[in-house]
Image (cartoon, helix red, strand yellow):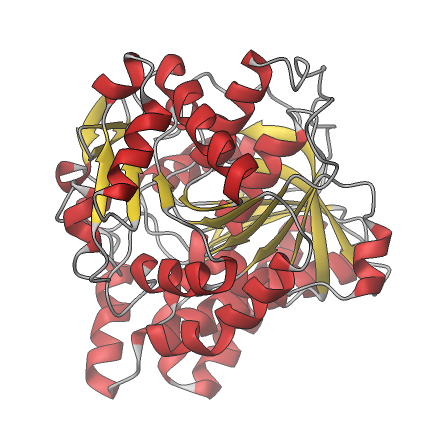
Amino acid sequence: MANLPHRVLTFYGDDFTGSSAVMEVMTFAGLPTVMFLKPPDPAHLERFADYRGIGVASTARSMGPAWMDANLPEAFAALKALGAPVNHYKVCSTFDSAAGTGSIGRAIELGAAAFGPRVVPLVTAAPAIGRWQAFGNLFAAFGDGIFRLDRHPVMSRHPATPMHEADLARHLAAQTDWPVGLVDLVSLKAGRGGAALEAAREAGSRIVSLDVVDEETLAAVGEAMWQEARAHGLFAAGSQGVEYALIAHWRAAGLLPPAGATAPVAPVERMIAVSGSVSPTTAGQIAHAEANGFHIEPLDVAATVDPARWECALDAACDAASAAIGAGRIPLVVTARGPDDPAVARFNAALAETGTDRAEASARIGRGLGRIVRELVAAHGLTRAVISGGDTSGYATSELGVTALSALAPLAPGAPLCRTYADAPEFDGLELALKGGQMGAKDFFVASTGRMTRAAGRVG
């Protein structure tokens, strides 16, 4: 692997599911990567000295700019100290963000202040996960179709950050006043990717969005980024498309051999699954799980507005899930079964009636689901858990006392099965899958047991 430094990449993820997706892409390409829940200290780094990629997962996607100002500089400084040529601020592949919530623009400004890049490439698309960008506009798969982001059935009505603009430069304009340029697919297919990136920088662009529509443009984007990384160091923003692109180029250039075979997901008879997602994709997965014998247990999230009621709701869901395990069934605790579930309206009404902050209520839900996982793993000696929901996954995983995760086996694109590292023995070595709301095929929850082959199909 000549010319690839040992520690080749660091990343900071704005949510946990996206961070695990970076681990997936890197690890299964032959570059073992670890994800920490906070910037690692020297002792933790020493434990993972053989790993080629180092990342930190966060809940930045659900936070405001003030939180970013208080937390990102220290994290970026810790990653910069590792000396990797590639540094990546990882965002969701559907780019959901707003000026006041999960501002990608503000994160880029802070990252650039820490890493000092000449220009910040923005790579959001990757065909492997059903994302394409053409002339600056992002498209995403859903079901059997491909939709421009502002017309996407899920993302255009996202409960926290609905996407009403597919042109990523226009979307970013509400989050930063930095000029945003474009390297389009025409330049990439003509072999002018690196030259176009440099031209955009010279024209004054501080952020440059790069199209990706196929494997050819993916590798061309990787080549342009690697040229910048080798010459000046790289700070990039985007989805795991950053890693897909770099790996495509490294392979084409002979810097990285083809990936070896990966172990399949081992079967288990018992596990716990929880979901805080309202995505229609997840709703279909819940229905499929129910049809295949899972016990679906609703969690009354409207109760989050009252501490006593919320404790009762958590206890009731935990008791019911525990009983299901005792009866030989796999429990799946859910907050909603899609955006039209009456539970969503009840939750919204409860927030409005009490003036409860939505972000705080969402954090309580995530922590509550994490508590359910924690208690059931400890009580029943479970070895596998699944957490669905991008924001949910961060809060829930933090409840388990986990310090780091590594990718163990492929489960679905963007949602691998991971291995946890923790001080508490019952949570060290737990097999944990973190799934974004739009991730996975219909049989995701069933496939996570290892008893059935994952259905074919891209992320939707």
Choose between 456 and 203: the one closer to the eye. 203
Q: Residue at x 40, y 20 (%)?
A: 220
Choose between 339 and 392: the one closer to the eye. 392
Q: Is residue 147 left or right of residue 31?
A: left
Picture mark count: 0
Taking the image as drawn, is residue 317 in sight?
no
Quadrant of the image containing the N terminus: top right
Specify the quadrant of the image occupied by residue 270.
Answer: top right
**Residue 7, how many percent across, how many down?**
71, 41
Q: Residue at x 22, y 24 (%)?
A: 146
Q: Is residue 137 above or below residue 43?
A: above
**Residue 26, how many percent across, how many down?**
62, 33
Quadrant of the image containing the C terminus: top left
Choose between 422 and 301: the one closer to the eye. 422
Q: Residue at x 65, y 64 (%)?
A: 39
**Residue 372, how many percent across, how many down?**
61, 64
**Residue 289, how many percent across, how many down?**
49, 35
Specify the quadrant of the image occupied by residue 442.
Answer: top left
Choose between 316 and 220: the one closer to the eye. 220
Q: Residue at x 22, y 54 (%)?
A: 172
Taking the image as drawn, is residue 260 in sight?
yes
Q: Is residue 33 above or below residue 15?
A: above
